[in-house]
Image: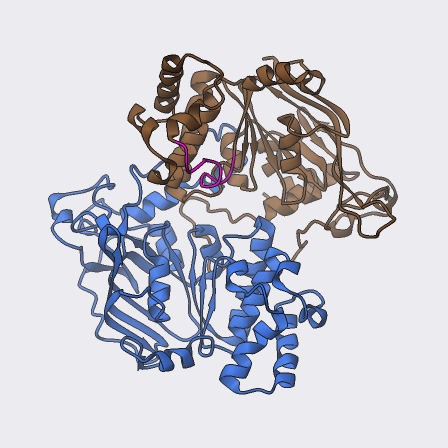
Amino acid sequence: MTPVVLALHDIVKHYRRPRQRLWAPGPVVQALRGVSLQVRAGQSMGIVGESGSGKSTLARVAMALERPTLGSVRWSGQDPNALDASDLRLARRHVQMVFQDPYGSLDPRQRIGQIVAEALESSAVAKAREQVEESLLAVGLSERDADKYPHEFSGGQRQRIAIARALITRPRLIVADEPVSALDVSVQAQVLNLLADLQEALGLTYLFISHDLAVVNHVCDEVAVMYAGRIVELGTPGQLFQAAAHPYTRALVGELPRDRPGVAHGPRRRLQAQTSVRVQAGPTLESGACAYAQRCAYRQARCQVEAPELRVISQGHQAACHVAESVMVEHLGEQ
Amino acid sequence: MSAAGTIERVDHDRTRPAAILEVSRLTGTLNTARGPAQALRGIDLSLAPGQTLGLAGESGCGKSMLALAVMGLLPAGAQVSGSIRFQGQELIGASDAALCRLRGNRIGMVFQEPMTTLNPLHRVGDQVAEPLRLHQGLSRASARAEAARLLDRVRLPHAAQSLRAYPHQLSGGQRQRVTIAMALACGPDLLIADEPTTALDVTTQREILELINELVAASGMTLLMISHDLDALARIADRMMVMYGGSVVESGPLDAVVTERAHPYTRGLFAARPRWSALGEQGAKRRLQTIPGRVPELADLPPGCAFSNRCAWTLDACRAGLPAALAIGPQHEARCVRLNEPGFRS
């Protein structure tokens, strides 16, 4: 087993929204309600969930951009929230981030060289230049690109620049928040291949946030499915997509069109209005019920009073559902 | 399907009279900073009433230009030739007044970004009522009542109260429902949806697709849906058209295009997606197939077949001129010079 690069333990994150009445405090939104996960060196952990499920809050907490309300974050054993500002700055070189929108994440007024070198604190300009070139080459750009501006590049190339910027501090962990969602299909494939190559060459660890299950399946060793601020299922892509044990995961997987080789998508696939998948805006505070109960096809009386804990279903596979086993058996039986 | 069968030029002049939209030999040139850009290069398409056509391709392939051309909304200075017939009426060269009578009336439009489609300063009820007052001359009160009915039909929650809402008070999916209600207001015969789900959340995307599907089926509208999302198109379309470099490289019944992928670009597009069939298979980590290079700017397309500089099968003949559309099955054609070589289509 390789060492744990990122460990989150029982993270709770509350946000207070602006007050709605003059004398009452604003309502509290529970963005994360007790999330624990570990990512080992060289592995890719995927985070799946719809908007509002807490994926991006999780990324911000993992990057120590937000302090958790409760719980702890460890970067290779070190607690970033316990460090003072200058030590945190130093520690940050080990974790980097790649964002979704390659148009919004690069300063249009800076040259690529400046953008990529920003994280370096080196005063030796010549050495910085060398590192920038190395970083650009690693992502398949040329050293001449350092003198250009972002507008001279296409979306895919910009995402390469964003990756080069993340690589320059030689991080252990890269948090990628929807890194290919804004890209066209053929470019998406190029960037996914690049991420895979870099992982192999540099031993990178990824926390990969995406709504696209096919992409997550392609990239990740392990996947966490989030719903309303909690991890509802955790396992390998094989476990999740072939033997889903949580009804929500099942609903997500069930919606996928599958094109078996040689068989068409089928004539006009009728979309089923089965379990309509939408999060209730702003999960309410103490209710004691499973957050998914209202939409769940497997709901039982117990689900309304007792929120299920994440528990082990099989080797390396966890789910937070009272009837996880029967959901899984049914899913397996359908294939 | 076997590659057998005679291959011949498709005769576009023999058109079915029933077609609601008939585009033939449409070319469009835009003036850009980099010189004239051939945004549309000889587009032919024919849509029968009630058909749903999915238009696929990456950004910069001319998909939206085709939609804008049909609606007469190409940017100023664009030169258009060829023919666009809507219900028998020629749209190229038609007066602005004539086009205005069609747009929002017989032809409904839904765009990608609902926040820019809607006017932030007007209540959504008034915006949905506008085409009704304009095209159908309804009174303020009856237009409002009709707007409420439309918002209910697109399943906007609390439709009656939402009439008074401003766009910023609605979520992205709700806004898109409003723009769909606007497009449907006058009961159009043709609905053009340009990336209607791209700016939305995944699960909202599904709901909007479902809604469009349902409305189209219920009203018998003809649908032209543009998307770069092949899965979305596969859920909604009967026919599929793949565009590259301003021309249609392949078009045919959905099944035929998806299974045969006759044109190398169609093949590349489908292969670049992580495959659903591999979903959950252990060891799915492998390299994805990519199309080398990137989509060229429309202003500097290579001569001949626009895909020739990225294609693995390129011959000299590819650069000689735009390949003719060859029939490869019932109503299925592609523009590639090597289509009839044995073993090329496997």
Please check the rendered image and state whether residue A101 is part of the magenta-colored stretch, yes or no.
yes
The brown-coloured chain is labelled: A
Q: Quadrant of residue B176?
A: bottom right
Q: Quadrant of the C terminus of chain B?
A: top left
Residue B210 seen from this side: yes
Residue B138 horizontal/vertical position (percent): 57, 86
Please tell me whether residue A70 is drawn above or below residue A252 in the rendered image: above
Main SS, magenta region, reads loop
Residue A106 lies in quadrant: top left
Residue B147: give x, y in percent of width and height. Answer: 62, 76
Percent from the top left, x then y, of residue A70? Answer: 78, 27
Which residue range is magenta in the image? A99-110
The residue that appears at 33% across and 45% down in the rendered structure is B267
Instruction: Check the image and report above or below for A73 versus B40.
Output: above
Q: Residue at x 22, y 48 (%)?
A: B300
Relative to A300, say whether B166 is above or below: below
Front position in the image: B19 or A111: A111
Q: Is residue A270 left or right of residue B32?
A: right
- As for residue A267 lying within the magenta part, the answer is no
Say which residue appears at 40% left-offset and 57% top-offset. B255
Give the x, y percent position of residue B21.
35, 74
Nearer to the camera, B260 or B28: B28
- Image coloring type: by chain
Residue A272 seen in the current view: no
Q: Tell me the quarter of the picture where residue A131 sits.
A: top left
- Give the colour chain B carries in the figure: blue
